[in-house]
Amino acid sequence: MSEITIEIFKILYLVTSAVSLWIVFSLLVKFKTDSDISLVFVIFILIMTLPVLNGYLALTPLALPDWILSFIYRYTWLYGPALWLVFKKITNNPVSIKVGAIHFVPFLLLGLLGSTGLINFDIWYIWATLGQLSIYLTNVFFKSVQHRRQLAILLSRFSSTNLYWLAYSQLGLLALIALDLYILINLTASGEFNQLFWQIMLIAISIYLLLLCAALLFIQPSDDQSAHDESEDTSDADSEVKEFKSITANAARSLADELIALMSNEKPYLNNGLTLKQLADQLGVTSHQLSETLNICLNKSFYDFLNQARIEHAMALMQTEPKQVSVLNIAYQSGFNNKNSFYKSFKLQTGETPAQYRNALRSDPASSASGRVESGVTQ
């Protein structure tokens, strides 16, 4: 390479490394949105930055120790686990730290063995690398088909959240994996390591990282911008938008409408073991997004919202069920799993005990209209 070309590469690699590390520092300090997602971004960006930083150092008199280079030259083994872990996060099925760490053990072992000279870039190593990537790609592909509805909702409705950009970052990673596979296949065919292929890979990673960092910095709206966009919707929109973290205000309002329709049509609240995650899965969103929608748009916690729907259902049953059906049976039919919880929620929302409400129905059936809960969750 000419001196001019080398200098251009050095500038590209240095700028990419600096910007990436600055983004990592910003995410660690500020945590703009979901802290778990920010941590995933930090790990992911650091993994992608290592080869670029090494590419810069390789073009200077400086050099990293051989044992570090052994790990960097085997970074391809990080692609599969990174892709899988991020996909699990996107689909609201995050794994524990221990389980996630297990997937990085092969990379660590290969790095250690490579630093001692026990493993080289021979044909068996290349085929093992191709096999590992194929396993992860196949798994993610079939899981993508399984979660296609949830992914479609994420990409269409939550375009201003880190979760959205985490999803799109994987498209770039897939492109890098395809390029890396092409290089590995050529390496298998020629039996020689081509420095040109290595530089092409580093340039591709640099461009990918710069685009990803630009998206995190400029494309995602800030709190002030979101507040400006929503300022004309309601008088108290500004105070609401400041509290949104994992979902935009418009998407939250849309999700609230879908939630009320789901409660009315499918009545998931009748399941006495219903959890926030289960309800979020039915809507194709994360638990954080549903919780924020309930708290901000509907001004209720998950359990308050759930119990309100169950009380409305119980009140309707009292109007239609024979008088011989006990209040306890009605409580069970409405999704409650114990008497105390039912009585407490009923009294809190109606100002009457179930027996008092039922007696009022007998004396004046028209009173049921005024006794219903105001929000009409199940209407």
Image (cartoon, rainbow, N blue to C red):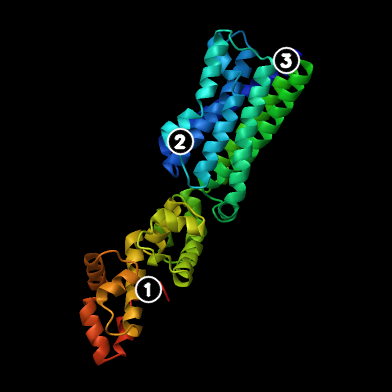
Q: Quadrant of residue 138?
A: top right
Q: Position of residue 178 (x, y in %)?
A: 70, 33
On the question of residue 193 being in view, the answer is: yes
The alpha-carbon separation of the residues under discs 3 and 1 comes to 68 Å
Picture residue at 42% right of the left edge, 38% below the top: 30
Q: Position of residue 332 (x, y in %)?
A: 31, 69
Given residues 369 and 53, the one toward you in this image is: 369
User: Where 54 sits versus 231, above or below?
Assistant: above
Query: Tag 3: residue type?
Result: Phe
Name the quarter where the N terminus is drawn.
Answer: top right
Callout 2 environment at 10 Å: few (<14), some (14 to 19), or many (20+)?
Answer: some
Picture residue at 60% right of the left edge, 22% below the top: 51
Identify the residue position indicated by label 2 in the image: 39
| Label 3 vs 1, first from the N-terminus | 3
Callout 3 environment at 10 Å: few (<14), some (14 to 19), or many (20+)?
Answer: some
Query: Tag 1: residue type?
Result: Ser
Name the quarter where the C terminus is drawn.
Answer: bottom left
Identify the residue position indicated by label 1 in the image: 375
Q: Which numbered mark, 3 or 1, is in the foreground of this view? A: 3
| Label 2 vs 3, first from the N-terminus | 2
Identify the residue position indicated by label 3 in the image: 193
Query: Tag 2: residue type?
Result: Leu
